[in-house]
Image (cartoon, helix red, strand yellow):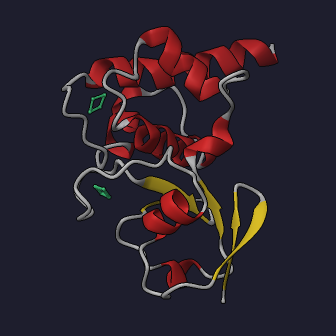
């Protein structure tokens, strides 16, 4: 039996150990916020945090995450109370068609936790593994920067 902490809650999985993490999250746990794009580790749409590191959940067999803490986009906020990063995406129009958005949010969350800030050039590198087919990267960058600046203002 595989045991994971998902968004702070202990969950177990008794299926095949090589089931992809994305399938366990979406199909077993009902966490459909994580999206599948390519299914081959190329697009980043399926990004979640495993023990704080941004990973492609389409590439990871669930057995590899046994005992780990997994965070999905659902951990960032709720429709009633969005998290700061989600607020930034709402304000700046970063969620365009939305398929890449959960992965962008999770990669940006990992980056901010590692001490990333409002430096757009570094941020572009941090989310380089997340592709947006709408080609609207500027809004996404603006969204993260806006959220970082909003947090700084809130702390003053
Ligand atoms: S769906 Fe996982 S990287 Fe594209
Ligand atoms: S918002 Fe459309 S793919 Fe990113």
Q: Which quarter of the frame holds ligand 1? A: bottom left
21 vs 96: above or below: below
Assign the C terminus to one quadrant of the image: top right
Percent of width and height locating residue 108: 49, 40
The image quadrant that residue 4 belongs to is bottom right
Instruction: Name the residue: 65% across, 38% down.
Output: 76
Expressed as whole percent of the image width and height from the top left, the position of residue 20 reads: 42, 73
At horizontal 43% and vertical 79% (from top left) the residue drawn is 19
Left or right: residue 44 compared with residue 152: left
The answer to whether residue 53 is visible is: no
Q: How many marks?
A: 0
Where 95 falls versus 64 (above or below)?
above
Given residues 116 and 102, the one toward you in this image is 102
Q: Viewed as shown, does residue 34 lie left or right of 141?
A: right
Quadrant where the image shows the N terminus: bottom right
Q: Residue at x 44, y 63 (%)?
A: 22
Q: Position of residue 91 (x, y in %)?
A: 51, 9
Say which of 26 and 40 sits in front: 26
Residue located 45% across and 28% down the image: 119
To which quarter of the image does residue 142 belong? top left
Q: Decide which of 127, 101 is in the foreground and name it.
A: 101
Q: Is residue 122 visible?
A: yes
The answer to which image quadrant residue 49 occupies is bottom right
Where in the figure is residue 68, as x and y percent of width and height?
65, 74
């Amino acid at each position: 039996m595989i045991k994971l902490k998902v968004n702070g809650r202990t969950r177990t999985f008794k299926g095949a150990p090589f089931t992809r993490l994305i399938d366990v999250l979406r199909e077993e746990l009902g966490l459909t916020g994580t999206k599948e794009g390519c299914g081959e580790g190329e697009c980043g749409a399926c990004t979640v945090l495993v023990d704080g590191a941004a990973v492609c959940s389409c590439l990871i067999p669930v057995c590899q995450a046994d005992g780990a803490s997994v965070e999905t986009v659902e951990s960032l906020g709720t429709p009633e109370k969005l998290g700061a990063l989600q607020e930034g995406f709402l304000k700046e129009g970063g969620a365009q068609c939305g398929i890449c958005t959960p992965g962008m949010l999770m990669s940006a969350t990992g980056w901010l936790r590692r001490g990333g800030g409002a430096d757009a050039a570094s941020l572009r590198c941090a989310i380089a593994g997340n592709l947006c087919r709408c080609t609207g990267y500027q809004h996404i960058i603006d969204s993260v920067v806006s959220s970082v600046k909003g947090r700084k203002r809130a702390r003053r």
